[in-house]
Image (tube, grey):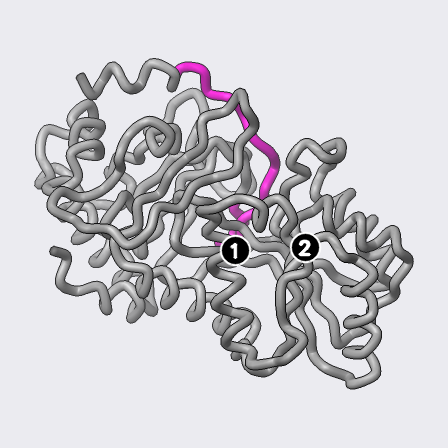
Amino acid sequence: MFTDITDVFKINCDEDFKKVALKVFRYQYQNNPVYRSWTAGFVRSESDVTEIEQIPFLPIEFFKTQDVICEGTEHQEVFTSSSTTSQVPSKHIVKDLSIYERSFTNGFELFFGKPKDYCILALLPGYLERTGSSLVYMCKKLIELTDHKQSGFYLRDLDELIDVIKQLKIAKQKTFIIGVSYALLDLAEKNIELNSDFTIIETGGMKGTRKEMPKEELHSELKRKFKLGHIASEYGMTELLSQAYAKQDGQFKNPPWLKFMIRDVNDPLTYLAPNKTGGINVIDLANVYSCSFIATQDLGQINEIGELKLIGQYDNNDIRDCNLMLS
């Protein structure tokens, strides 16, 4: 068992991050058979890796077909991604839900403050109508921490939600509305104006209900309809136990135990300079019992101060044969 999980949440500088990341890499190299098999194609032994840039990143597609978990690990939950009938959902086997709760609570507080100071309204249709959503789990726990009687999930009853919003406006209650893109657009079309007491956090996803649109266009439409100056965003996924947030302008900041790196899509072992577009690699040290080093299919850029901008997604068809490397 990894004995120093508290070290993950004590990171406060680059040197701390490097030290813990290398320790987590060695643990996962030794104990995660899926990750060890993948890294065999890149390093001869764990001792070859002395810098973060030398760590191999596991393609995120493995979470669809393999049990990405360290050996001898009992688990408390299996989170699954949403999918269409033609897609295979990802699954994230979680040993210890308290690590996830600590990660998302600390991350939320880092960017927004204590949940108890807010009312949280969650607009997550689709996610609520299936089991295994890590986003629903996170929102449920944050809602509980608010201890506000009007905090809660609002499935598809937008009229009820609008009544609650009107009451919160009168009460001058600081409020978060956390929702998927298409549900927020549905709410915006009800012509309900918000004010500075309200923060919209969009979590992405049209889920086939609307035509996909660039994030800038989505935010512009939401700002116009809600009469808000800014729209916030959350960047998370089933395969991660941590989230990044963009409070405005689509520039995501990460908590100290989460790091983004931009790889060349044609040469995944090469990392790009600031403001260059490439594939997003994620180091999530809260994923200590699954895999902390994940190569996503998202495209992005990192600026000079380490903020991430999402560009879109790409299909890496070469990964379709990656399971052969495990045989």
Q: Is residue 30 left or right of residue 281?
A: left
Q: For the N terminus, give its image quadrant.
A: bottom left
Distance from label 1 to label 2 (Cα)?
12 Å
Please report the bounds of the magenta region as a residue range: 302-318
Q: Residues within 10 Å of mark 1 (few under 14, many from 20)?
A: some
Q: Is residue 206 left or right of residue 131?
A: right
Q: Quadrant of residue 51?
A: top left
Image location of residue 159, percent across then percent down: 83, 61
* Residue appearing at x 35%, y 51% in the figure: 284
Is residue 313 one of those drawn in magenta?
Answer: yes
* Residue appearing at x 57%, y 50% in the figure: 128
Q: Is residue 15 left or right of residue 109?
A: left
Circle 1 residue: 136
Q: Which is nearer the eye, 114 or 148?
A: 148
Is 302 rendered above or below residue 194?
above
Is 287 rendered above or below residue 144?
above
Q: Which is nearer the eye, 259 or 122?
A: 122
Considering the numbered disc 2 on the image, is that residue within a helix, a strand or a loop? loop
Image location of residue 250, percent across then percent down: 65, 52
Of the two numbered discs 1 and 2 on the same chain, state the one appearing first in sequence: 1
Is residue 95 one of those drawn in magenta?
Answer: no
Q: Which is nearer the eye, 137 or 245?
A: 137
Q: Amino acid at mark 1?
A: Val
Q: Residues within 10 Å of mark 2 (few under 14, many from 20)?
A: some
* Residue appearing at x 70%, y 46% in the figure: 181
Q: Amino acid at mark 2?
A: Leu
Circle 2 residue: 155
* Residue at the extreme bottom of the image, as rendered: 171
- Total labels: the figure holds 2
